[in-house]
Image (cartoon, coloured by chain):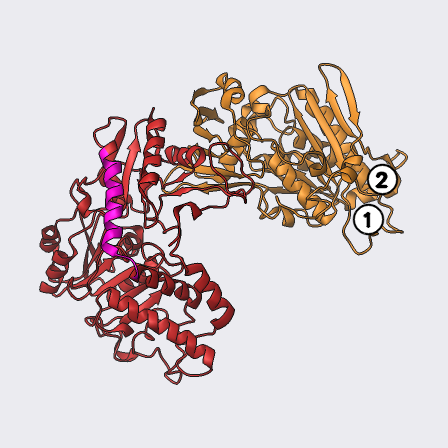
Chain colours: A orange, B red
C-alpha cells in the first residue's frame, strides 16, 4: 500500500480483482502464494494433478502430508492460502483445462497467469485471452532457464479503433503480439525437455513466477506503463538475463489467432483429444496438429532411458513409467499420438504425457 | 463405380514421403474397418442426400402438400425395396430405425413381457446391442436368460440352442455373422428350431444385411434387425426392423398388461396420419414409427440399395472371402501371429481377427494407422463374450474387415505392414 503506483486505490483494485491461475505446479504455487499475500480478492486455481513427493522440491504450497493424503493440487493450494490470507476467496478446480471448460473459468477474470506444464494448453489459454481481451502472463521454466512475457491482447470490442487498439478514454495501452504471433504452433511432442525428464532448478521457478506475479499486479492495478513489453529470458546457471523485443511480431506476422481471430485451440480444432479405449484400462491421446511433424524417438528415448524401462523401434516407443507410485505404460507413435495404459481417466493420461513427453 | 484411387480421407496439412498425395494434399488411406461402418459409401449416396436436403426435405405425410407426399413416396419406395431384398411378405412391417442397435432394442423390448415369466436364448457371439438389453433385463429378474457358447471355429451348433429351449422360452436372439470372427451362422436351422418350438426368432443381421442372402420367409425369421450403414453401404443413422406376422401390434391399449403375444410400441408419437387416435395407431409401420423419420438418411440409403441392386451380390461376398482367405493363409501357422476363428472362408463374411505376438492390439492398430495409413479396429469390438471365449479379454484383437470397395492390393499392403511390424 505504501508503494507508489499502488496506494490505497491499488490495494482496493487488488481486493476487487479475480485472477485465473492456470496450473498449480511449480510456477502456479509461487504465483498463488505471492498474489494471495498481496491481497488479490479472488484466485481461481485450476489443476488436474495430485501432489507427488518429487513436486515438493519446487512447489512451495505443498508438504509431505499432502503427498501422504494424495490431495489434489488445487485443493491443497486453496487450504494453504486460506491459512495465509483468510480474507480472500479461493476457488479450487480439479480438472483438466480444456476447450470445453476454459471460457467459463475466465469469466470476470482480470488476468490469467501461466502455471501450465505443456504448450498445447498455453495456446488454448492464449486463444481465450485474445478472444475475450484478458491479459495473459505467459511463463515457463525448465532446467536452469525460464521465460516470461506479458500478453496484452489486441481488443475486438466496439470501443476499439480500426487497428484493434483501445479507443480514446481507455487507458489500456495498445495490444502486443500474442503467443501465436511469436510461436506459430506448439512444438511437436517429445522435442522439448520437461521438468520430469530433465528436472528444473527450484530458484528458476521462483524467479520466473515472481516476475509473473509482479506483471499480474501491474495489470490489476492498471499500471500499464510499467508493464514489460519484452520477452524475458533468464539463465540462472550461465548468469544471463536477456530481453527480446517481440513487439514487431504482430505487424510482420499473419497471426491466425489475434489478427484473424480464428481460435483453433479454443474451437477444439487443434490440440489433443483423449478417448478411453474400449473395455480397457487405457486412454488414447490423439494430437490434432497442423504441422504434420513425424517424431524421431532418439532424443526422447535417451531422456527417458534414465527414468524408466523403454522399448523402441521405428514404429513406437514404449515406456514403463512409475508415477506417483502407480505403474503406467506409455506407448508413443510417430505422429505424436499415445496410448497410456494403467488409467481410464483422460486427465491422468494427459498429465503423464505432459510430464514425460511434453509438447 | 467409384475407383479405388478416389477413396480419400482428409488429413489436414499432413505431409509425409510415405504416402501418395493428390493435388489437394489429401492422403489416401486404406480402410479395412467395414465391420464398423462401410467406407466409402455407395456412389450416389452423398448426392442423393444433398438433393433431398436441397429439394425435397419435407416431413413425410400421407396427404398434404406436394413435398410431403414426395418425401412419403421416397420412404415407402425404399420400405418396399428392402422388404423384397430380405424376402419379407408385407412391406408395411418394415420399420425404419436409427441403426441396428435401435432395431434390436425395439425388437427385444417389443416382444418380451418383462414380468419374469419368459426365457430368452442367446449366444456368446452377440454384440453388446444384444448382450446389454438382455443382460439388464436378466439382472432385474425380468427375464430368464441362457447364453449358448460357440465352438473354437466361431460357430453356434443349432442343436445347442434346441436343447436349451424351455416351455417358457419366448425368444431366440442370434447374430447372422460374428462381428469379431466373421463366421456366418446356420440361420435356417435355428429358424426351423424356433418355429418348431413356437419360439420367436430375432436375427441380428448387422454384419450380413446387403452382403449375405437373407430370406425372412425361408429362414423363418420373426424379427430382422439390420443397419443401413454397413454392407448396405448407406449413411449412418439408418437401419430397420422387419416385424413378422407372429408379432401382432397391440389390439388396444387396455389389454396391454394381459396380453403376452403382442408387440409393444415404445416410441410413440406423431405418425402423419390417424391423428385423432388417442394412442399410437395399431397399423404397421405407424405403430412403431412415431416421430419424424431420418428422411435425409433414408434418401441416401435408397441410393445405396439401388446401387447394390446393380451389383452381383454373390461376387461381392466371394471377393470379401478371397481377401480374408489371403490374410488367413498368410498369418495362420506363422508363429508371429494368432488368427481367431474358423479358416473355412466359405462360411465367412469379410471380417477376421488376429493378434501380433508381442503387441497389444491397440498399439498395433495405432501403428497401422500412424505408420502405414491403414484403418483397422482393435479392442473388444463390443463383443466381450467372444473375446473371453477366445482368450483375448481384455486386450482384444486386431479386426481386419475389407468391404465392397477393397481389393487384393489393399490386403497385400496390410500383410506387408503386419510382416514389418511383427519383425
A234 in magenta = no
SS category of the residue bearing label 2: helix
Find residue B394 and name its label. none
- The secondary structure that dominates the magenta segment is helix
- Give the label, 1 or 2, closer to the camera: 1
Identity of the residue drawn at 88% across and 33% down? A3
* Outermost residue toward the bottom in this view: B276
- Relative depth, front residue between B110 and B181: B181
Kind of element beneath mark 1: loop
Q: Is residue B29 left or right of residue B223?
A: right
**Residue identified by numbered label 2:** A224
Q: Earlier in the sequence, mark 1 or mark 2?
A: 1
Q: Which of the 4 image quadrants contains residue A36?
A: top right
Quarter occupied by the N terminus of chain B: bottom left
Chain ID of residue with mark 1:
A
| B354 or A201: nearer the viewer | B354
Q: Which residue is mark 1?
A: A163
> Where's residue B387, x and y in %?
27, 40
Residue at image x 74%, y 22%? A234
Q: Inspect the magenta stretch and tell me whether residue B319 lies in it.
A: yes
Total labels: the figure holds 2
Residue B42 at x, y percent in the picture? 38, 56
Rounded to the nearest angstrom, the CA distance separating label 1 from label 2 is 19 Å
If the image is split into quadrants, where does the C terminus of chain B sit? top left
Dot 2: within a 10 Å radius of its alpha carbon, few (fewer than 14), some, or many (20 or more) residues?
some
The 10 Å Cα crowd at callout 1, few under 14, some 14 to 19, many 20 or more, is few
Check the residue under mark 2 and report the chain it is in.
A
Residue A203, given in percent of the width and then of the height, sits at 70, 20
Q: Which region of the structure is painted magenta?
A: B310-329
Q: Is residue B123 visible?
A: yes
Amino acid at each position: 500500500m505504501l508503494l507508489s503506483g499502488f496506494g490505497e486505490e491499488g490495494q482496493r483494485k487488488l481486493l476487487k480483482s479475480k485472477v485465473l491461475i492456470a496450473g498449480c505446479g511449480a510456477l502456479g504455487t509461487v504465483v498463488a502464494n505471492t498474489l494471495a499475500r498481496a491481497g488479490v480478492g479472488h484466485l481461481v486455481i485450476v489443476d488436474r494433478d495430485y501432489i507427488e513427493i518429487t513436486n515438493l522440491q519446487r512447489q512451495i504450497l505443498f508438504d509431505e502430508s499432502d503427498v501422504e493424503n494424495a490431495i489434489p493440487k488445487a485443493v491443497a493450494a486453496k487450504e494453504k492460502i486460506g491459512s495465509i490470507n483468510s480474507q480472500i476467496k479461493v476457488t479450487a478446480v480439479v480438472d483438466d483445462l480444456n476447450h470445453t471448460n476454459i471460457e467459463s473459468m475466465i469469466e470476470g477474470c482480470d488476468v490469467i497467469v501461466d502455471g501450465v506444464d505443456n504448450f498445447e494448453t498455453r495456446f488454448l489459454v492464449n486463444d481465450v485471452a485474445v478472444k475475450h481481451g484478458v491479459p495473459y502472463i505467459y511463463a515457463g521454466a525448465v532446467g536452469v532457464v525460464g521465460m516470461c512475457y506479458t500478453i496484452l491482447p489486441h481488443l475486438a470490442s466496439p470501443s476499439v479503433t480500426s487497428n484493434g487498439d483501445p479507443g480514446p478514454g481507455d487507458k489500456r495501452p495498445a495490444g502486443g503480439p500474442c503467443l501465436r504471433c511469436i510461436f506459430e504452433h506448439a512444438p511437436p511432442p517429445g522435442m522439448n525437455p520437461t521438468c520430469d525428464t530433465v528436472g528444473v532448478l527450484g530458484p528458476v521457478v521462483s524467479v520466473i513466477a515472481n516476475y509473473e506475479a509482479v506483471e499480474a499486479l501491474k495489470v490489476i492495478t492498471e499500471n500499464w506503463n510499467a508493464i514489460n513489453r519484452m520477452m524475458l529470458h533468464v539463465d540462472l546457471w550461465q548468469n544471463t538475463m536477456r530481453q527480446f523485443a517481440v513487439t514487431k511480431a504482430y505487424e510482420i506476422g499473419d497471426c491466425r489467432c489475434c489478427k484473424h481471430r480464428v481460435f483453433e485451440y479454443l474451437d477444439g480444432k487443434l490440440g489433443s483429444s483423449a478417448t478411453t479405449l474400449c473395455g480397457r484400462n487405457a486412454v488414447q491421446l490423439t494430437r490434432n496438429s497442423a504441422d504434420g511433424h513425424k517424431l524421431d524417438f532418439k532424443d526422447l528415448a535417451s531422456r527417458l532411458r534414465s527414468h524408466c524401462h523403454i522399448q523402441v523401434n521405428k514404429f513406437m516407443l514404449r515406456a514403463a513409467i512409475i508415477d506417483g507410485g502407480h505403474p503406467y505404460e506409455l506407448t508413443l507413435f510417430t505422429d505424436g499420438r499415445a496410448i497410456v495404459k494403467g488409467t481410464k481417466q483422460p486427465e491422468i493420461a494427459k498429465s503423464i504425457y505432459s510430464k514425460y513427453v511434453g509438447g | 463405380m467409384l475407383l479405388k484411387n478416389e477413396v480419400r480421407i482428409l488429413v489436414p496439412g499432413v505431409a509425409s514421403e510415405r504416402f501418395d498425395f493428390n493435388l489437394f494434399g489429401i492422403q489416401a488411406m486404406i480402410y479395412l474397418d467395414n465391420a464398423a461402418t462401410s467406407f466409402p459409401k455407395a456412389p450416389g449416396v452423398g448426392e442423393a442426400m444433398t438433393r433431398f436436403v436441397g429439394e425435397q426435405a419435407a416431413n413425410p405425410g400421407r396427404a398434404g402438400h406436394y413435398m410431403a407426399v414426395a418425401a412419403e413416396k421416397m420412404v415407402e419406395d425404399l420400405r418396399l425395396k428392402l422388404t423384397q431384398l430380405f424376402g419379407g411378405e408385407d412391406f408395411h412391417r418394415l420399420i425404419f430405425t436409427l441403426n441396428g442397435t435401435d432395431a434390436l432394442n425395439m425388437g427385444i423390448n417389443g416382444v418380451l413381457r418383462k414380468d419374469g415369466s419368459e426365457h430368452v436364448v442367446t449366444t456368446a457371439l452377440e454384440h453388446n446391442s444384444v448382450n446389454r438389453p438382455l443382460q439388464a433385463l436378466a439382472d432385474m429378474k425380468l427375464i430368464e436368460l441362457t447364453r449358448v457358447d460357440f465352438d473354437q471355429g466361431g460357430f453356434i451348433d443349432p442343436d445347442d440352442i434346441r436343447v436349451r429351449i424351455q416351455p417358457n422360452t419366448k425368444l431366440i436372439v442370434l447374430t447372422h455373422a460374428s462381428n469379431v470372427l466373421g463366421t456366418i451362422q446356420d440361420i435356417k436351422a435355428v429358424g426351423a428350431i424356433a418355429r418348431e418350438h413356437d419360439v420367436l426368432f430375432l436375427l441380428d443381421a448387422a454384419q450380413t444385411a446387403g452382403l449375405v442372402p437373407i430370406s425372412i420367409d425361408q429362414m423363418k425369421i420373426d424379427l430382422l434387425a439390420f443397419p443401413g450403414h454397413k454392407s448396405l453401404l448407406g449413411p449412418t443413422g439408418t437401419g430397420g426392423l422387419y416385424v413378422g406376422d407372429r408379432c401382432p401390434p397391440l389390439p388396444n391399449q387396455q389389454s396391454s398388461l394381459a396380453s403376452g403375444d403382442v408387440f409393444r410400441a415404445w416410441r410413440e408419437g406423431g405418425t402423419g396420419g390417424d391423428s385423432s387416435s388417442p394412442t399410437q395407431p395399431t397399423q404397421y409401420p405407424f405403430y412403431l414409427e412415431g416421430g419424424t423419420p431420418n428422411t435425409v438418411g433414408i434418401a441416401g440409403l435408397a441410393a445405396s440399395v439401388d446401387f447394390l441392386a446393380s451389383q452381383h451380390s454373390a461376387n461381392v461376398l466371394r471377393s470379401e472371402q478371397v481377401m480374408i482367405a489371403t490374410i488367413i493363409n498368410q498369418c495362420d501357422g506363422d508363429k508371429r501371429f494368432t488368427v481367431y476363428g474358423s479358416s473355412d472362408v466359405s462360411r465367412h463374411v469379410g471380417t477376421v481377427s488376429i493378434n501380433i505376438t508381442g503387441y497389444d492390439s491397440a498399439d498395433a492398430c495405432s501403428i497401422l494407422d500412424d505408420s502405414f495409413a491403414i484403418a483397422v479396429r482393435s479392442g473388444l469390438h463390443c463383443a466381450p463374450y467372444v473375446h473371453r471365449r477366445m482368450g483375448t479379454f481384455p486386450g482384444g484383437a486386431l479386426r481386419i474387415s475389407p468391404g465392397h470397395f477393397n481389393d487384393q492390393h489393399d490386403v497385400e499392403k496390410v500383410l506387408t505392414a503386419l510382416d514389418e511390424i511383427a519383425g
